[in-house]
Amino acid sequence: MNLGKNISKYRKKQNLSQEELAEMLKVSRQTISNWELNETMPSSEQVVLLTKIFKITADELLEIDTENVLIEKMNGTEKIVKSQFKVVKLLLVIFYFLILFILIGFIIYFVTLKDYTSDYQEYANCNINNKSIRLFITPGIYNKYDEEKEEYVIVNDNIWRLHIEERDQNNNIIMPDIGLSAGYSYKEALDSLNYLKKRIIEKGGTCS
C-alpha cells in the first residue's frame, strides 16, 4: 500500500497545494509532506477527513481490495450453507423413517457440534513477513459518501465490521485500522475473522 503516493495523487487531482490541504486538516505543511514521503502516517480520523476532501472511499485511498475479500467470503458462506443443508436433509430422512436413525443423528450432531469458544475468537494476533497483524470484530454501521449531500450517510446500521490493524516489528502502525463489512450477524463476523486467520496461516504466517 502506497498511502503517501495516493495522498499526493488525489491532492493534485483536487488542485490543492500542500499548504491548502494542511490548512483544511489543521496540520502543518511539513506533516503533509511527511505523509506523501511515507515518513509518517495519518491517523484513522485524518484518513476519514482525507476521503471527504478527496471525495473518495477509504478503500480507494488505502488501495484495499475489498472485492476479492468479499468474493472469497461469499464463496466460503456458500459452502457452509450447502453443508448445513445436507445435514438437515439427512436428519429429516432419519426422522421420518426410523427412530433409531433419529437417535444416531442426535449422537452425530452432538459429537460434531462446533464449539465456537475454541474454534473462533473475537480477535486474533497474527505474524507474517515480519509484520504483526491484529484482527478483531466489532458491531458497527456501514456508510457511504453521498456526492449530492457531500457527506457520509448510513446505509445499514445493523452490521458487523472486521478490523485489520497492521504493525511492523517495532509495533508501529503501518496501515490505519479501517473496518471492513463482515456480515449481518455475530457468527458471520466470526466466520470472516476465522477465514482470514486460515489464509494467513496457509501463506506461512502464524496466529494465536
Image (tube, rainbow, N blue to C red):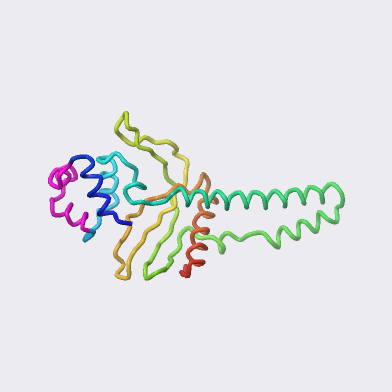
**In this rendering, would 57 be left or right of 94?**
left
- For the stretch drawn in magenta, the main secondary structure is helix
Residue 35 in magenta stretch: yes
Q: Residue furthest top?
A: 148
Is residue 9 visible in the rendered image? The answer is yes
Residue 63 in magenta stretch: no
Span of residues in magenta: 16-37
Residue 184, image x and y in percent? 51, 44
**In this rendering, would 84 be left or right of 27?**
right
Residue 171, image x and y in percent? 31, 67
In the picture, which quadrant includes the N terminus?
Answer: bottom left
In the figure, 186 relative to 134: above or below? Answer: above
Residue 82, image x and y in percent? 67, 50
**Which quadrant would residue 141 be assigned to in this image?**
top left
**In this rendering, would 97 be left or right of 180?**
right
Residue found 55% across the figure and 51% down from its top: 187
Residue 202, image x and y in percent? 51, 66
Q: Nearer the viewer, residue 202 or 112?
A: 202
Residue found 33% across the figure and 51% down from its top: 62
**In this rendering, would 12 be left or right of 61?**
left
How many discs mark residues in the rendered view? 0
In the figure, 20 relative to 129: above or below? Answer: above
Is residue 208 visible in the rendered image? The answer is no
In the figure, 42 relative to 129: above or below? Answer: above
